Amino acid sequence: MSSLYLQELTKLLAKVEAHEQQAMESAAEKISQQLASHHLIHLFGCGHSHILTEEVFYRSGGLAPIHPIFVEELMLHKGASRSSQLERKNDYASTFMEKEDIVPGDIMIVISTSGVNPVPIDVALIAKEKGAFVIGLTSPSYATSRASRHKSGKYLHDVVDLVINNHIPKGDVLLHQQDISFASGSTVIGGAILNDILSRTIQKLLSRGITPPIFLSGNMEGSDEHNQRLIDAYKGRITAL
């Protein structure tokens, strides 16, 4: 039996490639400019969106100046349903975002497929106040299928500088059978989008004659020394290193 799930993922990837080329290219251009000026890329997501912040952090073949904002109360391991409730709290983001080392010229990528909950929206707003260029990875069609929970009535795609549409349908489900909807696609599609943007960024840095700061696999000869140099260079601002 052929995989209906893989077929739907393939369709979604084709849709992203067809409709998000300009947005992803714009994101890569902006990020490459700011990395050339020694700025950081910050990422934030709640619940399962948090997985994508780790996908590109301290990654073999990935850029070193990447800072995921880890808030354990908004992850799943300290209580899945509790994290969902906290994500819905207006102004909760200020409890952790005010202390984050985000400076003018940095990049902030906020990931929320539904785009309706207050915490990701407030993270985007606070990052903008700090002077970051904010990119939202979200699904506007999913968001506008229901009312925003943010006190302003706005969605994530309303408050960011650049929207990357992951084209995930309402409910983040790809398959439907016997009145049951199932099979999430946001993590796979989101991972592909982020890796595409960062790959484009690396290519743009190379075209400018800049050697990108890229981690090597820890299983390659000489990688420990190479990676330690990068850790030493960035750990002042990226404490998770």
Image: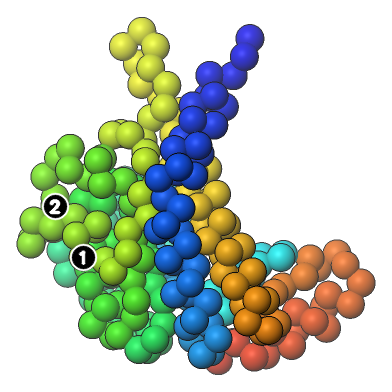
Q: Are marks 1 and 2 in contact (CB under 8 Å)?
A: no
Above or below, 236 relative to 127: below
**The disc labelled 2 sits on which kind of residue?**
Arg
Work out which quarter of the rendered image holds the C terminus and state it: bottom right
Closer to the chain start, of discs 1 and 2, is 2
Residue 24 occupies quadrant? bottom left
User: Quarter holding the N terminus?
Assistant: top right
| Label 2: which secondary element | loop
Residue drawn 26% across and 47% down?
140
Q: Which mark is residue 99?
A: none
Work out which residue is located at the far right of the displayed protein and give it. 221
Residue at image x 39%, y 11%? Answer: 177
Front-most of residues 108 and 224: 108
Taking the image as shown, residue 183 lies to the left or right of residue 96, namely right
Q: Is residue 217 visible?
A: yes
Q: Residue at x 53, y 77 (%)?
A: 32
Where in the figure is residue 39, as x and y percent of width and height? 49, 86
Query: Does residue 92 sit above or below 195 in this rendering?
Result: below
Q: Residue at x 45, y 42 (%)?
A: 18
Q: Secondary structure at mark 1?
A: helix
User: Can you identify the residue that label 2 sits on?
Assistant: 149
Please, what is the three-letter code of the amino acid marked with disc 1? Answer: Val
Measured from the top left, where is residue 94 in percent x and y?
A: 23, 76
Q: How is the image coloured?
A: rainbow
Of the numbered discs in the image, which one, if any, rests on residue 159? 1
User: From the viewer's perspective, is 149 left or right of 20?
Assistant: left
